[in-house]
Image (tube, grey):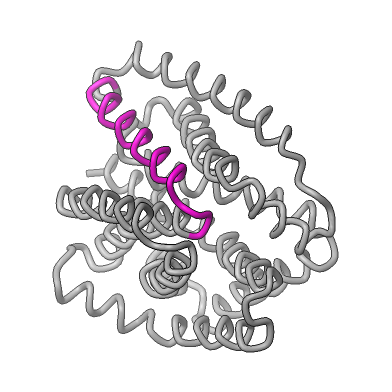
Amino acid sequence: MTKILNITIIGSFAGLWVATLFSSKAELILGFLLILTFGIIHGSNDLLLIEKLFTKEKKRSFLKSLFFYVLTVLLTFLAFYTIPSITVILFIIFSAYHFGEQHWESKVDTKYKWLSLILQGSYGALILVILFLFNADQVDEIVMAITGAPFPPAFLLYSLYSILTLLVVTVAILAFNSDSFRKVLLKELFFLGLLVVIFKMSSLIWGFTIYFVLWHSLPSLFEQIHFIYGRFTNQTIWLYIKNALPYWIISIIGIGLSYFWLKESVLFFAIFFSFIAAVTFPHSLIISLMFKKKNNNTKTH
């Protein structure tokens, strides 16, 4: 995991360098390429995770798992068309917790369950709100394309104040009670500061790319591969990619067709983020179940 962190930090500074030298269009192209490779690959093996999660007595058939997974994705797409405002809010909430869970799951003692849940949710929400605040105009265009309603900037500011208050209180309680948490706190504050600088210097897509690919997808790939195969090696990385490849290709074809029809209009960004949201709902649940099973296995050994 240390190697993954080193790659993340080096990649983040490289991303900051790109943000200072390249145009927004270049950031857009590079950002989509990275999201369409590393970003989507990390969520393409959910069915394999499902098979690993359930014991032989409770294991669901592949077709049944596939059916419920696809049904969830389709219902999410339908929700974006029928109740877009509610769906966008739910997507942000799910994404915030999912990002926070991935980042903090192994860094907080399991005996602080509720504090850990609050930390994960508020941290992920803070990441998204900061990114949105620095790119409020772009966010407003995308939200308008999805929901047909403007996105009030004041909402982001009030959200930032509320989230920061909740996060600071939670961090203070954990720091007071947990030695292990205090040991990682300064390092985590540095990482958060680095992300704020990157978001400030980058476009919406590039800032999202750096966080989504380097800070979320790479650690998630490590956790998933280790959970599925029991070890993280070149061989298991290849096995993971080989299993994910069919679902990744289907995703790329779908996004490619959307771009072909919509070109560079804001509607494409709306469809793209709708796709990310549709996959995020089932994926975040599966990852939560993976962490729960991993912790239960740790307690029994």
Q: Residue at x 25, y 18 (%)?
A: 179
**x, y (%) of residue 111?**
38, 26
Q: Residue at point 47% right, 30% down?
A: 119
- Can I make out residue 41 in this image? yes
Q: Is residue 62 above or below residue 46?
A: below
Q: Nearer the viewer, residue 117 or 42?
A: 42
As rendered, which of 169 and 52 lies closer to the eye? 169
**Quadrant location of the C terminus in the rendered image:** top left
Q: Residue furthest top?
A: 176
Residue at 29% x, 53% y is 17
The one of 63 and 240 positioned closer to us in this rendering: 240
Q: Quadrant of residue 100?
A: top left
99 part of magenta stretch: no
- Left or right of 285 in this view: 20: left
Q: Quadrant of residue 128?
A: top right
> What count of labels does the image hold?
0
Q: What's the magenta region?
A: 182-205
Queried whether the magenta region covers residue 186, the answer comes back as yes
Give the residue displayed 50% in from the left and 49% down from the top.
98
Left or right: residue 103 compared with residue 266: left
Up-down: is 194 above or below 17?
above
Q: Does residue 43 appear in this view?
A: no
Most frequent secondary structure within the magenta stretch: helix
- Across and down, in percent, residue 248 comes to 44, 81
Instruction: Judge left or right: residue 292 versus residue 90.
Output: left
Q: Where's residue 256, x and y in %?
A: 55, 85
On the image, the x and y values in percent for residue 23 come to: 44, 63
In the image, 14: left or right of 170? Answer: left
Nearest the eye: 26 or 246: 26
